[in-house]
Image (cartoon, helix red, strand yellow):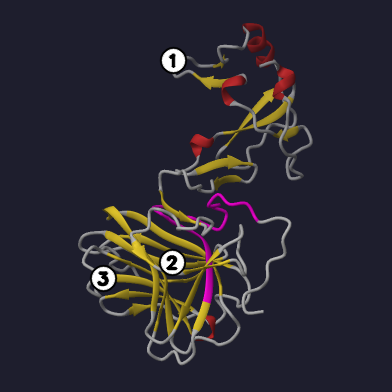
Amino acid sequence: MGRGALLALVALTSCIAPAQTIGAVGYDDVVTETADPGTTGTEMSTSSGASSDASSSTAAEVCLPACVETQPCHESLCIDGECLIAYRDERCGAGEVCGPLGCVRQPLNCSSDSVLLCEDFEMDGFAPEWAGGSVGRTSADAHTGMFAGEVSLAPEERQQLNFDIDPPVAEGTLAVRSFVWVPAAPMVQEWIIFHELSGRMDVGTERYSLDLKSMYGLQYVALPGSMSGPPNPSAIPPETWACVELRIQISDTAGNIEIRVNDVVVDSNDMPIDTLPVDGFANVNVGGLASTAESDPYTFLFDDLVIATEPIGCATDPGVAPATGSTPVQFGG
């Protein structure tokens, strides 16, 4: 690559001197300085495509003011008297890439190895990975595409899709994310379970759930022991699509449960807890389960659901582009 191509820049930052430019410069295509432990000076190293003339020329160059690296994953390079910044992804953590603001998490997609299931409700028979269960499907409104899942619950009624994890997940992270639409009325009287995660022994113990509480609050519940976080009455806004994620860090002594709404943490445990079922996480139920106190039928929508073994976030796209050329009708309107 010639030097003219190296000056293709991605972004400028006002906090850096004008002589310094932020650019996505390929590290293998530029001339860099490397310190040889066997010498007292600094030798110049080039890629296979760079010439020795380029090396000697760059060795004599000085950038004034001096190059400044504003992020740990940035590497400054002085080329033709101008400071360039190379983005070094290898300096970031797993699943992260380097950019102008430093290391940022790269959104998952349905082909990622850590993604166990994606459901956008666009297929007539739902995603083939489901083991069973049943929910409705509606075109009245959707977060993306033309269809969403629909759950209508009477007291003590269950409408859920069931997913089996084989082999079970016994370490790391397990997360479930969906976009949820809840009505303004009627409100939940006691609770409705959105997501349930459990081990292979589905007997009501060692279960972890995300519950919708009265006044639109969200709360995690961990069994046995009925450990739960305080409900947040303003966690999920009614009559709009909200990104809701239940994220579990798995450990028998230092586990953590986190609820995120639109990528903001709204609830988590204060002290480490046991989040490891005896045989690992093997079942995920998604949909709704109503308490005995619900006096009115309750209907809500959910869409673009992802189950993964790493944090998901709201940017993860299950592969469906937003519908165009149509005006969705708000459910319940």
**Residue hosting label 1:** 38
Q: Position of residue 237 (x, y in %)?
A: 60, 76
In this view, 70 is above or below 303: above
- Image quadrant for the C terminus? bottom right
First in sequence: mark 3 vs mark 2: 3
Count of picture labels: 3
The residue lying toward the viewer, choosing from 6 and 302, is 302
The label on residue 206 is: 3
Q: Position of residue 27 (x, y in %)?
A: 58, 25
Task: Tell me if 274 is positioned left or right of 75 in this view.
Answer: left
Point out the stretch of residues depicted in magenta: 300-322
User: Would you identify the image quadrant in which residue 130 lies?
Assistant: bottom left
Q: Main secondary structure of the magenta part?
A: loop
The residue located at (60%, 78%) in the rendering is 238
The label on residue 258 is: 2
The residue lying toward the viewer, choosing from 284 and 236, is 284
First in sequence: mark 1 vs mark 3: 1
The label on residue 217 is: none
Task: Kindly report which numbered mark, 2 or 1, lies closer to the viewer in this rendering.
Answer: 2
Task: Tell me if 245 is positioned left or right of 17 in this view.
Answer: left
At label 3, counting other C-alpha atoms closer than 10 Å, the crowd grade (few under 14, some 14-19, many 20 or more) is: many
Alpha carbon separation for disc pair 2 and 1: 50 Å
Q: Position of residue 160 (x, y in %)?
A: 39, 70
The residue lying toward the viewer, choosing from 324 and 221, is 324
Task: Kindly report which numbered mark, 3 or 2, lies closer to the viewer in this rendering.
Answer: 3
Which residue type does callout 3 highlight? Glu
Q: Which SS class for mark 2?
A: strand
Which residue type does callout 2 highlight? Glu
